[in-house]
Image: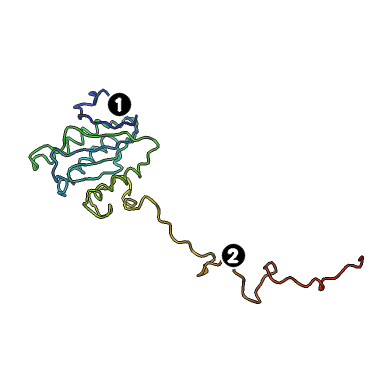
């Protein structure tokens, strides 16, 4: 299944979200967007973000998930996560993470960290995680927070250096071709070698036929 859904976070794994039959258990990949409780600049404070990342790391280890990518905007957190084995339960993972991260920040903030609703999508097999992550990492650029994705410090990965290609253009810029054989200038196939260095197969003036030995049969 690969659908975009908006649902209330269930209080337990046994409660469905909108009648979904997909059980969210196993080695699946998910694109998840979690809005902050208040549309304010909550995720501009390093202390808040570090507390959220700490809770995210704990939940990912406990419920066997890889956090392939994460990106904080001032009022949202976007994740790409993938189950590591057949027991990886995305709903249980998300419940634990949201509860722990909110608990770490609620006293200081004076309100819950997250809204009750969130957006999730199961990635199709044909979707490249790196391409999806690259689009996520462009979010701060589109929001006008930074000029390039590589400048933004509040995004990354727990498992791989996907940020290495975050700032690369979608269309590759091919490097200039180097001349063959290390020559400083590219030679045209029509170019003729200098006088005295012509090879036997070059187009030079044909020899006079009178120089050829003639047969005696004529």
Badge 2 crowding class, 10 Å Cα cut-off, few under 14, some 14 to 19, many 20 or more, is few
SS for callout 1: loop
2 vs 1, front mark: 2
Residue placed at 40% from the left, 37% from the top? 126
Q: Is residue 49 left or right of residue 109?
A: right
Residue at 10% across / 39% down in the picture? 106
Q: Is residue 51 left or right of residue 189?
A: left
Q: Is residue 28 above or below residue 76?
A: above
Per the image, the residue denoted by label 1 is 23
SS of the residue under disc 2 = loop
* Pointer 1 local density, CA inside 10 Å: few below 14, some 14–19, many at least 20: few
Q: Is residue 95 left or right of residue 121?
A: left
Q: Gap between marks 2 and 1, in whole Å?
A: 65 Å
Observer-nearest of 66 and 170: 170
Q: Position of residue 88 (x, y in %)?
A: 30, 32
Which residue has dot 2 on it?
189
The image shows residue 46 at horizontal and vertical percentages of: 16, 49
Residues 202 and 206: in front is 206
Name, please, the residue furthest toward the bottom. 196
Q: Nearer the viewer, residue 2 or 98?
A: 2
In the displayed orientation, state which residue is furthest to the right.
217
Report the residue at 73% width, 70% height from top. Answer: 206
- Quadrant of residue 96 in the image? top left
């Amino acid at each position: 299944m690969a659908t975009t859904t908006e649902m209330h976070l269930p209080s337990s794994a046994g409660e469905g979200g909108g009648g979904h039959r997909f059980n969210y258990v196993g080695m699946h990949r998910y694109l998840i967007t979690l809005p902050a409780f208040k549309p304010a600049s909550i995720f501009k404070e390093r202390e808040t973000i570090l507390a959220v990342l700490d809770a995210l790391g704990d939940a990912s280890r406990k419920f066997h998930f890889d956090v392939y990518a994460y990106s904080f905007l001032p009022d949202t957190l976007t994740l790409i996560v993938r189950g590591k084995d057949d027991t990886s339960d995305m709903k249980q993972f998300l419940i634990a993470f949201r509860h722990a991260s909110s608990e770490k920040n609620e006293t200081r903030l004076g309100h819950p960290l997250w809204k009750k609703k969130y957006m999730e999508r199961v990635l199709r097999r044909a979707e490249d995680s790196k391409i999806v992550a690259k689009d996520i990492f462009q979010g701060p650029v589109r929001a006008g927070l930074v000029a390039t994705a590589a400048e933004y410090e509040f995004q990354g990965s727990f498992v791989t250096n996907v940020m290495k290609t975050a700032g690369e253009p979608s269309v590759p810029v091919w490097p200039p071709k180097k001349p063959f054989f290390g020559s400083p200038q590219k030679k045209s196939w029509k170019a003729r070698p200098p006088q005295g260095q012509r090879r036997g197969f070059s187009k030079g003036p044909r020899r006079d036929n009178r120089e050829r030995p003639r047969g005696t049969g004529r």
